[in-house]
Amino acid sequence: MNAGYITRRMLYGIPLVLGVTFISFLLMVYFGPDKTYELVGKNPTAEQIAEVRHALGYDRPFLLRYGDYVRELITLDLGLSDSTGEPVSSILKRTLPISIALVVPGFVIGNLLGLALGLLAAWYRGKWLDKLVMSMSVVGMSISFLVIIIGLQILLCTPYGLNIFPVRGWQVDDIGSYFYFVAVPTLALVLVTLGYNTRFYRAIMADEIERDHIRTLKAYGARPAEILFKHVLKNSLIPVLTRIMFSIPFVLISGSLLLESYFGIPGVGLATFNAITSGDQPVLKAVVGLTGVLFVLALTINDMLYSVVDPRVAKS
Amino acid sequence: MTTPALKVTDLSVWFETESGRIPVVDRISFTINAGDATGLVGESGCGKTMTAMAILGLLPASGVSVESAGIEVNGKDIFNLNARQTRAVLGRDIAMIFQQPATALDPVFTMGQQISAVYRRHAGGSKQHIREAMLDALESVGFSQAEDIADAYPHQLSGGMRQLAMIALATVCKPAVIIADEPTTALDNSTRTLILQQLERLRTLHKTAILFISHDLNVVRQICRDVIVMYCGRLVEKTDCPSLFIQARHPYSAGLLSCIPQISATRPTPISSIPGQVPVLTDLPPGCHFAPRCTRVEARCRKSVPELDDKNGSGAACFRPL
Amino acid sequence: MTRDIWQRLKSDRYGMSGLIVVTIFAILALCVWSGLLGQDWAKVSGSPFESASAAHWFGTNLLGEDILQRTLFGTATAFEVGLMVTICSTLLGTVLGGLSGWYSHGWLDEVILWLKGVLDSIPFYLFAAAVAFALQGSPWAMHLAMIVTFWTTTARIIRGEVMRIKQREFIEAARAIGLPGLITVFRHVLPNTFHILLVQGTIVFVAAINTEVILSFLGLGIQDGVSWGLMLAESSQEVLGGHFGNFIAAASSLFLLLMGFNLLADALQDALNTRGEFT
């Protein structure tokens, strides 16, 4: 892996970034609400209207306005929130760490568990253990995220259930309070993703286990644990990593959106949710644009990871 | 009489299907002494690879059943072992070389890592010691730059080199028996010679017993002393190579031989083929499996199964041997 | 061949039960559409938060509306959303995927692939919010957002198929006079891809319903009428006060329908020997 390779991969990402930001611009800024009438007073004259429109940049050519948007994103000059007046960049700085702290445990556990179960199901393919795991996966996939969240809330946070965790909130000062507030959201995240993860990983592992080199390993007396954890896993690493990388943005955004708005956790998701309900354009266009860029970044890093993991790819 | 390196007695493999039990390997028995090579010959699908898998205990537990009166390596039973005991034997006392080294080797580990793993598993020792044993194994198959090969991944080696590396993998623990399943089929002529040379070396220098599985009689005759012929899961002839080529006794073996074009003949010899087709395993005829295609068939061939009589060391399973 | 597939499908007990469940729900939806059931979903027919009784099988909600009626109407909504999104995104995906595969590695293909990459890169819920924003709260914003993002997986699959078939037909065509027209390829591709599209369709349907639930919770979903998503959104507050009617009705209907679809999808995948892809 050399500088040329890295540059090439980065270059491929540019058209995608442009596309993402363009759509974001189109939807949020161009077709978005016209702010003129909020800023002019009553009975505005044509001049006043024109003045305001000029100040807002509405009369600039399309491409220039798009260019402005991209510039804003790159320089993180994101303006002020419509609803609170706080600078958008400071909103993001404040909320992002919270969202990450919220989503990471569930994401990690959901994938590790999914890998383990998928491995188990693939090794005992066709036997009762496999069928059990697969049935549980289908059930897991059939329960909506929302149902899981509400259900867990009833079971764990209300007097109608166990009532050991808080219904909402996020007052985290130490490990103890962190665990207290992150437990139910993490559980929800794990339950929602487990079904999909397990099925996906099982399919990959089952494929891998059929391969000739696994037969060679068995022919030389390798123990099942060694075969599974050393060889099957390493050979499946590419599709596994791809999936993990691709799902990070999704889980981060959708997961945080629902979990935070439901549990009242002040992260990016809640800020976005508030922005959606109040129509706060600056916040929304910043979030949409930035997450799009982040996603393309994830894609690029993923490609580069391939060459590290699989020696066959490094050759090309 | 010395203990044979490999002794297989009445090995049978059955597939369990909805329509019943299908015999894929039917009471195979043979013996290989230390330093000898025996060829196991037959068309694809006749059960050769199944036999090898069954000897190593590598067949899946469900849907397949294996029966045998005994499989012994140097007198030690390897058939009635539990999983853990079997794993201890595989790679140490008996090892297998596969047909397609490109897929049989793990693509994400170096050759050195793979060979060392086998040695560490069965012999163990310090890291230094294991590395020496691994490099030794690579050198002994003819790699002069053993360290480079050890650091290479399978896809970085050529086909012939991969197969040689496979042999190094098989011999690092100096097993008494090696089963080679079509080791040269995927290779071109020059590398084929290399591989055969290595196998010959193993046989003569290390007294390794070799079971050489192939459909190609020409290759078999180059290094094997004895040959056993399989058809539809059954052993139909057992003899030594020279005798087979002078006069095969079972009609099927004779048919196989006449299929080989004779390049060195002074006159062009007609290439004949055995009429008919190999029967489907679910639809085997009673009596001798070869009867439908045999030119020497009689009434009793279709009714009863001719047994292989090898009291003199060789024989054919035929009522009317040639 | 279809008989063979039907046989395999019939022998899969789980798949068949899934099919039955889906059919029952479909019939309910039809009844609602034709005015036979669920018409009183907005009628205040009782006092607030009545518990389950003979008059109200699931009780009533905050406003005194019968939950059963609302659940039935929600069935129709689910199917309406599911069918519309599935059919439209499948059509769009087939056309674009077909074009992309036929002109593979050409400029049209590159453009469509780029478009796919871009759409796949935008987190869906944000995109839905953006669309709703842009359309100033039109009730079709949700459907549009889903159709515009869900077509990508179908397109990817169709593109692969077209490229595969193109290989085959091409060889024959090279001997024949001239190249087969785009129409001919479609006529060859579509019959062969029907089973893949069917499998993928069931997956998209499930995704659409799941998405609607969450969008409705966020306020971006159904604007008029009622859906299980809206009922769940209502219930999120209600359960804290001990009123579980909405939650139980919506959650169990949703679960049953999704489970039915998932089982059916699995059975279809096994019977037709193809795998789908999650959108």
Image (cartoon, coloured by chain):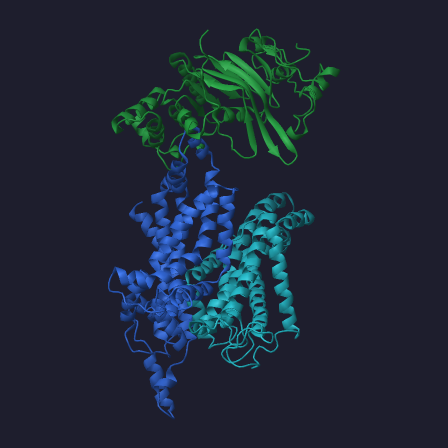
Tell me if residue B257 comes above or below residue B107 in the rendering.
above
Residue most extreme to the bottom: A43
Total count of labels: 0
- Residue at image x 65%, y 25%? B278
Residue B178, located in which quarter of the rendered image?
Answer: top left
The quadrant of the image that shows the C terminus of chain B is: top right
Camera-nearest residue between A275 and B1: B1
As drawn, is C117 to the left or to the right of A77? right
Residue C135 appearing in the image: yes
Tell me if residue A188 comes above or below residue B80 in the rendering.
below
As drawn, is A239 to the left or to the right of C93? left
Residue A220 appearing in the image: no
Q: Position of residue B81 (x, y in %)?
A: 45, 25
- Residue at image x 41%, y 12%? B204
- Residue at image x 39%, y 33%? B154
Q: Colour of chain C?
A: cyan
Camera-nearest residue between C199 and B72: B72
Q: Position of residue B26 (x, y in %)?
A: 60, 22
Q: Colour of chain B?
A: green
Q: Position of residue A63 (x, y in %)?
A: 38, 70
Q: Colour of chain A?
A: blue
Camera-nearest residue between A58 and B145: B145
Q: Position of residue C66 (x, y in %)?
A: 56, 76
As drawn, is B250 to the left or to the right of B33? right
As drawn, is C66 to the left or to the right of A240? right
Residue C239, located in which quarter of the rendered image?
Answer: bottom left
